[in-house]
Image (spheres, rainbow, N blue to C red):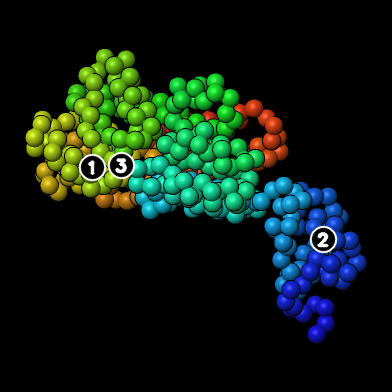
Amino acid sequence: MNHLQNSQGTTAGEIAKIANVSRVAVSRAFNPDASIKPEKRALILKLARELNYVPNHAARSLVTKRSHLVGVIVPDVCSPWESQEIDALTTSLQSEGFATLLFKTRADKQIDPQLLSYIRGFNPDSVIVFVENVRRETLAKVIGRAVPIYVEYDNQTSAAKDQGSGMLYDRLNVCQRRGIEQAVALLQGFECKRIAFLDGHPRSLAARERKHTLSEIMAARGMAAPIIVPGDFTYDSAHAAILSQFRVDNGVDAIFAANDVSAFGAMDALRYSLGLRVPKDVKVIGFDNIAQVKWRAYDLTTVKVDLRERVDALIRLILRRLKTPDAPILIESLSTSLVVRGSVG
C-alpha cells in the first residue's frame, strides 16, 4: 500500500512527514483563518482526503479555545416557522465551520435543568436562544465563556433591565412596528371597523409585543381597540377560537393573527365551517411569512420577517463576538414589512 491509499488511524504526524511540513502546518491547513501558503494547504488537504485523516477537534479546541459548536435553544422543532429557521440556520452555520447542538424546552417553555449541564459540557462557542422564558441569569451560570444571543421583539423594557443587571448577552431585535403599521393602514383603507387579534401562546413575549403594538397603532389612528381572541400559535386552537368568536359573539371584519399557522386555522374556520368568504366577508392577515403562505389554498397576506436576513444577522453576531470576546453587548436589528396577497383585497 503506498502513502496515497486509504488508511485507518492516520495521524497529523504522518501527514506532516509525507507532505514534508511541520505538524503545526497540518493544523493550520484545517483552520481557514490561519496563515499558510496556498500550495501547502492544498497538498495537506489532498493528502488528508486520500488517507482518510480527520483532525481531532477536541484536541484542537484545547489549543484554540474554540469548540466550533453552536447551541440553539428552541420551543418547538416541528412547527413551520421553527423548522424552516432551524434548517436555514444549520446550513449557514455549517458553511462557517460550525456544528449545531439543538436543545428543546419543555411544554411550559422552560428549560430542563439537565439540559443546562449538557450545554456546559459541550463548551459551545455561542448559544442562540429563541425562547424568552429561558432566563438570562440561569443560562449565564452554565455556559461558561460563551455569550448567549437572544432574539427579541421590540422588548425594550426587558433589554434595559438586563443591561442594568450587568449580564452580558447579545441581541437580535426584530422591529415589528413597521409591518404592523402597514397592516393596520391596509385594513383601515378597506374601512374595517371590527378587527380581531388572534393571539399567540400566553407565555410568548413576541405575541404580547405584537398585541401591544397593534393596539397602540390602532388607537393612534382613531380606531376601536382590537377584539382579543385567545390562541396559542396552533392551527387547531385558532380554528376553534374563530368558530367561538363568530357563533357566540359578534363576527369581525378582519382578523390579524399572531402567526401564519393561526391565520390558516382562522381561514379554514371561516370558509368551511361558517360559510364566509375570504377576503370579501372577512379579511385575514398573518405574521412570519412562512413558505406555506404562498399555497393557493391560503394566498395569505402577512407581516414578513425575512428569514435570510434573520439568519445572516445571527451569524454576524456569532462571528463578531468570537473576534471581539470582550466587546460590550452586540445588537443587530431587523425590520418587518407587509406582503399583500389574496386574503386581503
Q: In which quarter of the image is the C terminus?
A: top left
Give the image location of residue 328, x and y in percent.
Answer: 64, 27
The amino acid type, in three-letter code, at marker 3 is Phe
Q: Position of residue 192 (x, y in %)?
A: 21, 26
What distance separates the C-alpha of mark 3 from that of mark 2?
Answer: 51 Å
Task: Evaluate if marks 3 and 1 touch, with contact meaning CB atoms under 8 Å apart.
Answer: no
Q: Residue 26 carries which label?
A: 2
Name the residue nearer the viewer: 108 or 334. Answer: 108
Q: State the image quarter where residue 213 is shown.
A: top left
Identify whether 167 is placed above or below 341: above
Direction from residue 200 to residue 112 in the image, left or right: right
Cα separation, mark 3 vs mark 1, equals 7 Å
Q: What element carries label 3?
A: loop
Residue at image point 48% right, 50% down? 114
- Residue 260 in percent (x, y) is at 32, 42
Q: Name the residue under label 3.
A: 233
In the rendered structure, which disc, 1 or 2, sits on the residue that comes first in sequence? 2
Q: Nearer the viewer, residue 212 or 115?
A: 115
Q: Is residue 243 visible?
A: yes
- Other residues around mark 1 within 10 Å, as few (<14) / some (14–19) / many (≥20): many
Mark 2 surroundings within 10 Å by alpha-carbon count, few (fewer than 14), some (14 through 19), many (20 or more): many
Q: Which amino acid does label 1 sit on?
A: Ala
Question: On the rendered structure, is 252 left or right of 257?
Answer: left
Vertical arrangement, residue 330 with respect to residue 4, above or below = above
Farthest-out residue, bottom: 1
Between residue 155 and residue 88, name the one nearer to us: 155
Secondary structure of the residue carrying tag 1 is helix
> What residue is at 69 percent from the left and 57 percent from the top?
58
Residue 30 x/y as whole percent:
75, 57
> In this orientation, does residue 343 appear?
no
> Label 1 vs label 2: CA separation?
57 Å
